[in-house]
Image: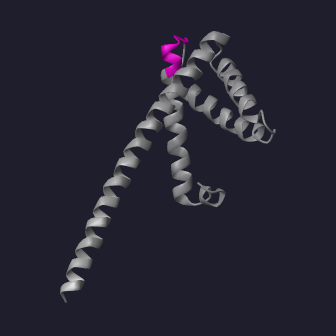
Amino acid sequence: MGTAALFTGYGLLILVVVFVVAAFFLWLGAKIAQIKNAGFGKALLATFLGFIAGIILRLVPAIGWLLGIIAYIVIIKYVFATDWIKALIAWAVSFVITVVLFAIFAFAGLLSIGAFMKAASAKQAAIFVFSSLA
C-alpha cells in the first residue's frame, strides 16, 4: 500500500482494521502469556506505539527492523506492566499467529490466481475456436 493510499478513505479504513486485528493478536498473546489485566485497550495502545516506533526505527540502516522488534517488546512490557519473559511471549505469539495467517492468505491467493489463469486460458481458447469458425 502506497503512502498516498493511506490518506484516502479506504486506506484509513484498512489501517484501522489492520490495527484492530494486530491488537487482537497481541491481546491473545498476552492472555496466553498469562499477563494480568491484559485488556484489549492496552493491546491497541501497544500496537499503535509499536507501529510508530517501527516507522521511526526503520530509518536506521541494516538493523532498523531488529531495533523495531526490540522497541515493540519494550512497549509491550511497559504498557501491560509485566516482566520481560511475558512480554516476549506475548509478542512471539502475536507474531506467529500473524505469520501463519499471512501464509494461509498468500496460499489462498496463489490458488485463486491459478484458478483465474485457467479460466482466462479457457476463455481465450473458446474465443480462438469461435473466431476461426466465423
- Farthest right residue? 60
Residue at left offset 59%, top offset 22%: 91
The vertical placement of 29 against 115, above or below, is above
Q: Classify 101 as above or below 131.
A: above
Q: Relative to the observer, which residue lies in front, 115 or 82? A: 115
Task: Report the residue at 53% width, 34% height from top.
Answer: 22
Relative to 25, residue 1 above or below: below
Q: Is residue 124 left or right of residue 50?
A: left
Which portion, as a residue range, is magenta? 29-36
Quadrant into which the N terminus falls: bottom right
Which quarter of the figure has residue 51? top right
Which quarter of the figure has residue 61?
Answer: top right
How many marks are shown on the rendered structure?
A: 0
Q: Depth check: give the residue in front, 49 or 2.
A: 2
Among all residues in the image, which is located at the extreme bottom? 134
Q: Give me the residue at 50% from left, 28% from top.
A: 25
